[in-house]
Image (tube, rainbow, N blue to C red):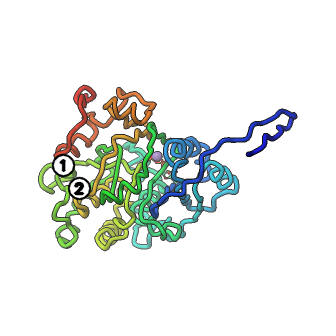
C-alpha cells in the first residue's frame, strides 16, 4: 500500500487517489487546438472541462498548433492538465501568409470596407489566415499524420455533460464522419461569392457529389442559393479522411484560388459544412445532443431532462440554442427525418 507523505509544514498527507490510465482499445484520434501563446489562460478552463467530462477516462492525445513557437510556459502548463500525450507544432510559414496569387491592394480594400461596416473581424488579417488554415491545412500538419479522427477545442469553451463512452469509437462504429453540437446562419456579408464559387465546383465535379448528400440542409431551393446554415466549427468531432479526400482537396483548391479568404472573409465553418453536406452521405453527419457545449455566446444544453440527468449536465435548458429560430438544427432534424426531443417546441422562440 502507498504511504502517506509529509507536507512542507510537517502535516501528514494521505496518498493521492487518481484514476487509472485507460488501458482499453483506443482509436487513432486526438484533440486539436490552434492557439496563440496569449490564449493560454483562456484555454485552461476549456481543457480542464474536456478532461473532467471526458478525457481523463480515455487519455487521448492533444495536438497544439501555432503560427509561432509555443512558449515553454504554454507547453508546461497545458501538459500538466492533459491526461494524454501533448504535442506542439509550428505552422509552416507559407500556410500563414498571403498567397502569391492574392492582390494585396484588393484585399486591403475589402478589409477597409468591412471595418467601416462593422463586420466582426472584418479588418483582421490573422483571422483570415486562421480561417484559411482551419479550412485547408490543419489536417495536413505532420503532427496530425497518425490520426484518423480529431476533436477541435478552442479557448473559452465548456462541456456541460459527462461523456462516459468513447466518442471516437462512436464515430467509427456508426460510420460517422462529421459531428457537431451547434449550427447557425453565417453573416452573408462575409461570404458574398462563396456559393457561386461552390456552384462552379459542383458543375465541373459532379463525380464528387454524394448520391445521398444533404444539399437540402444548406439550400432551400435545390442548390440555387445558400441558406447560410453551417455547423459551428469551434466544436468538431470529425474524420480527417474527409478533409484529406480528393473531393475536399479539389474543393479547397478551387475556393482558395478564387481568393475569397482575403477578398471577402470566408470562415472555415461554412466551408466545412458545405463540403460535409455535399461529399458525405447524410447519414454520416451527426448531431450530439448529449454533450452539452458552450462557446460564447451560444449554449447547447439538451432540452430532454433524462439526457441531462443521466449525463450529469450542469446547464440550463432555457439557455439552449438548438431549437431557436436562428439555429439550423431544427432543419437538420427535419431534412433527415430525425426525431426531435420531446418538448423541443417549448424552447423554440
Ligand atoms: P472566434 O471563435 O471565431 O471568435 O475566433 P477565435 O478567436 O476563438 O479563434 C479561433 C481559433 O483560432 C481559436 O482556437 C484561437 O485560439 C485560434 N486563433 C485565432 N487567431 C489566431 C492567430 O493569429 N494565431 C494562432 N496561433 N491562433 C489563432
Ligand atoms: Mn472561438
Which residue is at the front of the view, 81 or 36? 81
Query: Toward which corner of the image does residue 67 lie, by quadrant?
Result: bottom right
- Residues tagged 1 and 2 counted as in contact (Cβ below 8 A): yes
Q: According to the image, label 1 marks what residue?
A: 336
Q: Is residue 5 left or right of residue 233?
A: right
Quadrant location, the N terminus:
top right
Quadrant location, the C terminus:
top left
Residue at (21% x, 44% y) in the render? 333
The numbered mark, 1 or 2, whose residue comes first in the sequence reads 2
Q: According to the image, label 2 marks what residue?
A: 283
Q: Residues within 10 Å of mark 1 (few under 14, many from 20)?
A: some
Which residue is at the front of the view, 170 or 76? 170
Q: Is residue 137 left or right of residue 174?
A: right
Residue at (39% x, 37% y) in the render? 298
Relative vertical location of residue 7 with respect to residue 89 in this rendering, above or below: above
Which residue is at the front of the view, 205 or 245? 245
Which residue is at the front of the view, 153 or 250? 153
Residue at (16% x, 46% y) in the render? 337
Amino acid at each position: 500500500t502507498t504511504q502517506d507523505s509529509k507536507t512542507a509544514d510537517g502535516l501528514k498527507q494521505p496518498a493521492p487517489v487518481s484514476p487509472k490510465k485507460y488501458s482499453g482499445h483506443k482509436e487513432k484520434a486526438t484533440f486539436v487546438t490552434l492557439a496563440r501563446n496569449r490564449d493560454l489562460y483562456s484555454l485552461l478552463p476549456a481543457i480542464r472541462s474536456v478532461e473532467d467530462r471526458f478525457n481523463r477516462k480515455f487519455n487521448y492525445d492533444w495536438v497544439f498548433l501555432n503560427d509561432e513557437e509555443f512558449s515553454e510556459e504554454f507547453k508546461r502548463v497545458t501538459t500538466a492538465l492533459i491526461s494524454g500525450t501533448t504535442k506542439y507544432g509550428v505552422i509552416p510559414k507559407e500556410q500563414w501568409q498571403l498567397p502569391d496569387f492574392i492582390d494585396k491592394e484588393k484585399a486591403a480594400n475589402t478589409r477597409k470596407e468591412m471595418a467601416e461596416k462593422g463586420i466582426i473581424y472584418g479588418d483582421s488579417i490573422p483571422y483570415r489566415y486562421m480561417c484559411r488554415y482551419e479550412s485547408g491545412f490543419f489536417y495536413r500538419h505532420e503532427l496530425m499524420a497518425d490520426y484518423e479522427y480529431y476533436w477541435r477545442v478552442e479557448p473559452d469553451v465548456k462541456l456541460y455533460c459527462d461523456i462516459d463512452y468513447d466518442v471516437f469509437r462512436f464515430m467509427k462504429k456508426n460510420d460517422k464522419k462529421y459531428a457537431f453540437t451547434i449550427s447557425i446562419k453565417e453573416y452573408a456579408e462575409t461570404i458574398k461569392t462563396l456559393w457561386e464559387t461552390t456552384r462552379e465546383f459542383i458543375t465541373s465535379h459532379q463525380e464528387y457529389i454524394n448520391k445521398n448528400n444533404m444539399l437540402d440542409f444548406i439550400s432551400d431551393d435545390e442548390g440555387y442559393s445558400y441558406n447560410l446554415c453551417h455547423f459551428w466549427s469551434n466544436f468538431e468531432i470529425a474524420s480527417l479522411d474527409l478533409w484529406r479526400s480528393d473531393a475536399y482537396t479539389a474543393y479547397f483548391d478551387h475556393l482558395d484560388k478564387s481568393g475569397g479568404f482575403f477578398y471577402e472573409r470566408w470562415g472555415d465553418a461554412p466551408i466545412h459544412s458545405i463540403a460535409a453536406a455535399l461529399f458525405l452521405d447524410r447519414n454520416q453527419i451527426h448531431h450530439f445532443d448529449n454533450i452539452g457545449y458552450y462557446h460564447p455566446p451560444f449554449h447547447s444544453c439538451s432540452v430532454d431532462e433524462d439526457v441531462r440527468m443521466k449525463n450529469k449536465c450542469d446547464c440550463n435548458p432555457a439557455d439552449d440554442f438548438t431549437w431557436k429560430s436562428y439555429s439550423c438544427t431544427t432543419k437538420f432534424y427535419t431534412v433527415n427525418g430525425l426525431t426531435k426531443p420531446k418538448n423541443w417546441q417549448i424552447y423554440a422562440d
